[in-house]
């Protein structure tokens, strides 16, 4: 290909080289620049006839002082001023999407992790209860187990949580010993992967003991716009922990991208927005009470997956798949499809799906023409994993004890069932004490992750394929595997062709050592990497 190549003097190259990954190709990255400067560059870029490298030289390079980090302090008055004019003056929110930041939120409760991750236009990483045991005390002078602490919750809360974590710690050793006997190391299985898979099995079985107050770490990468929405959501939350972390996140973002979050603290912008969010929540709660929808059930529930609404048909999906390659209106495509018999439709659908050699090969955007809405009751642990999927709409009700909790059969086989049940009762009793004291928003901290929650997942067929194939995998946690398998069964009942396209669904149910194959693969990769490094030296 031929494309214009811009030339720069030696002096200009010296100014550009620290901030652009190359100076002679049409694709490059911006580096070593504050987020507001990058945002201002792109803001100006949309109304500048030249290239972005020339724009930097013309309007930004003079603000970079020699011998210091460019644009220290206020990020460069010109950059900040331009950003203010475009973003705040003209309301061009798209400019807030072209700068981002990494923020770590540590020692947050499992309740708060869901609030942090509610926005879909961001990337999140969270500590996993599948790989990290929670039987060790916190670092520092305070010590103690890893759970959220607040004087408002009273000493009874700490006593109950300490006992729940003590049960978890004792049971962890017991279940590990049982798992080692139940799945002894086979011939040819390396010792390390087998031991790690035994530990993972025990952690999987016992994660339901951990209370929602269990502390975790969350890493976030998001645009300025996504952070603004996150901050507003946190500041409008009735949960004190959420409001406190909202203030801390804002404080840190003001150090790295202040212009992107400048609206949050303005009474006429962020202040009004927070008030709107609070008012909307209060009105929803009033109507729930008025309609009698706040009466919690007296008995326990059971896990369930119901397909409550479907939007579209397999014919709509096929028409959407053909649309981009066709030259006619969608109505004509649908008319042509109507004359096909079932075998021809099946042949067409197979062609649209293609030959999938692994689950990461997914069909095109045409599969987004078909949508499903599921209402699910599962334990909170499974909900935590399913809620993290970005390309769907997840809504959930407040965690409470009324839908009950379950003890895994394998925990009973290991002889730890009675202790598991005792922890659940301690957890429930503390929840009820906090709720009776008027601490309704904080009461869920006390509940173990084995307690069930009701939520909906609304997603298109393409995302359903991704979620179901991923979460039904043999190495997945049994509770969310069961949800994914049930979702697949519900889709197959009405759209067998779509369900059949999900060729990497694992519908097996037998108990297994879930992580052993993954651990062996990881061990082989490490060994291969080590050998290649030795060969290179």
Image: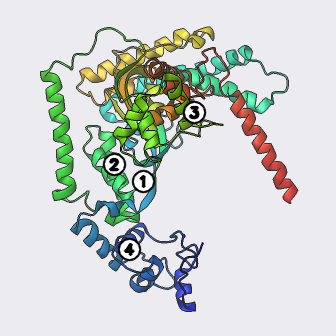
Q: Which of the two discs, 1 and 2, labels the residue nearer the N terminus?
A: 1
* Above or below, 77 relative to 114: below
Of helix, strand and loop, which one carries label 2?
A: helix
Front disc: 2 or 4: 4
Front disc: 4 or 3: 4
Separation of marks 2 and 4 at Cα, in angstroms: 27 Å
Q: Which of the two discs, 1 and 4, labels the residue nearer the N terminus?
A: 4
Q: Which of the two discs, 3 and 2, labels the residue nearer the N terminus?
A: 3
Q: Which percent across, then down, holds residue 381?
A: 47, 26
Front disc: 3 or 1: 1
Is residue 111 visible to us here? no
Q: Which of the two discs, 2 and 4, labels the residue nearer the N terminus?
A: 4
The residue singled out by tag 4 in the image is: 45
Give the number of the disc on residue 222: 1
Separation of marks 4 and 3 at Cα, in angstroms: 52 Å
* Above or below, 533 relative to 488: below
Of helix, strand and loop, which one carries label 3?
A: loop
Specify the quadrant of the image occupied by residue 48.
bottom left
The residue singled out by tag 3 in the image is: 136
Identify the coloring.
rainbow
Q: Which of the two discs, 3 and 1, labels the residue nearer the N terminus?
A: 3
Please give the name of the residue rendered at 42% of the width and 75% of the height, measured from the top-left corner. Answer: 72
Q: How many other residues sit within 10 Å of disc 4, few (<14), some (14-19) or many (≥20)? A: some
Is residue 440 visible to us here? yes
- Mark 3 and mark 2 residues within 8 Å of each other at the beta carbon: no
Separation of marks 1 and 2 at Cα, in angstroms: 10 Å
Q: How many other residues sit within 10 Å of disc 2, few (<14), some (14-19) or many (≥20)? A: many
- Mark 1 and mark 2 residues within 8 Å of each other at the beta carbon: yes
Separation of marks 3 and 2 at Cα, in angstroms: 31 Å
Quadrant of the rendering where the C terminus is positioned: bottom right
Residue 411 or residue 121, whichever sits in front? 121
The residue singled out by tag 2 in the image is: 230
């Amino acid at each position: 290909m031929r494309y214009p190549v811009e030339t720069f003097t030696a002096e200009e190259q010296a100014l550009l080289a620290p901030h652009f990954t190359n100076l002679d190709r049409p694709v490059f990255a911006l580096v070593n620049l504050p987020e507001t400067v990058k945002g201002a560059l792109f803001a100006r870029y949309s109304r500048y006839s030249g290239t972005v490298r020339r724009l930097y030289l013309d309007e930004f390079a003079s603000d970079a002082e020699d011998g210091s980090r460019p644009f220290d302090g206020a990020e460069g008055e010109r950059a900040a001023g331009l950003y203010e004019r475009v973003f705040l003056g003209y309301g061009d929110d798209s400019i807030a999407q072209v700068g981002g930041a990494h923020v770590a939120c540590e020692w947050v409760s499992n309740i708060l992790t869901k609030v942090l991750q509610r926005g879909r236009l961001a990337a999140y990483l969270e500590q996993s209860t599948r790989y990290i045991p929670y039987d060790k005390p916190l670092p520092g002078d305070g010590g103690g187990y890893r759970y959220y602490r607040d004087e408002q919750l009273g000493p009874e809360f700490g006593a109950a949580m300490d006992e729940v974590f003590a049960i978890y710690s004792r049971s962890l050793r017991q279940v590990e010993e049982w798992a080692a006997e139940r799945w002894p190391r086979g011939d040819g299985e390396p010792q390390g992967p087998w031991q790690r898979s035994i530990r993972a099995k025990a952690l999987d079985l016992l994660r339901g003991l951990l209370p929602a107050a269990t502390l975790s770490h969350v890493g976030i990468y998001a645009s300025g716009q996504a952070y603004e929405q996150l901050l507003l959501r946190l500041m409008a939350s009735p949960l004190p922990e959420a409001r406190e972390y909202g203030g801390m996140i804002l404080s840190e973002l003001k150090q790295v991208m202040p212009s992107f979050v400048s609206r949050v603290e303005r009474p006429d912008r962020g202040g009004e927005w927070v008030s709107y969010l609070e008012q909307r929540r209060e009105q929803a709660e009033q109507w729930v009470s008025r309609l009698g929808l706040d009466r919690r059930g007296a008995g326990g529930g059971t896990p369930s997956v119901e397909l409550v609404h479907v939007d579209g048909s397999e014919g709509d999906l096929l028409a959407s798949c053909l649309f981009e390659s066709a030259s006619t209106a969608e109505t004509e495509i649908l008319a042509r499809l109507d004359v096909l018999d079932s075998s021809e439709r099946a042949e067409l659908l197979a062609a649209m799906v293609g030959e999938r050699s692994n689950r990461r090969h997914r069909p095109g955007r045409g599969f987004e023409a078909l949508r499903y809405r599921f209402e699910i009751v599962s334990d909170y642990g499974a909900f935590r994993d399913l809620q993290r999927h970005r390309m769907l709409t997840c809504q959930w009700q407040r965690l409470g004890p009324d839908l009950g909790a379950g003890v895994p059969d394998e925990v009973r086989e290991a002889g730890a069932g009675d202790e598991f049940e005792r922890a659940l009762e301690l957890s429930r009793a503390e929840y009820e004490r906090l709720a009776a004291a008027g601490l309704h928003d904080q009461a869920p901290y006390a509940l173990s992750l084995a307690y069930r929650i009701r939520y909906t997942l609304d997603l298109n067929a393409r995302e359903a394929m991704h979620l179901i194939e991923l979460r039904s995998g043999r190495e997945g946690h049994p509770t969310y595997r069961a949800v994914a398998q049930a979702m697949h069964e519900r889709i197959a009942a009405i759209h067998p062709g779509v369900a059949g396209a999900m060729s990497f669904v694992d519908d097996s149910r037998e108990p297994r050592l879930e992580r052993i194959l993954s651990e062996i693969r990881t061990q082989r990769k490490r060994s291969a990497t080590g050998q290649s490094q030795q060969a290179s030296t």
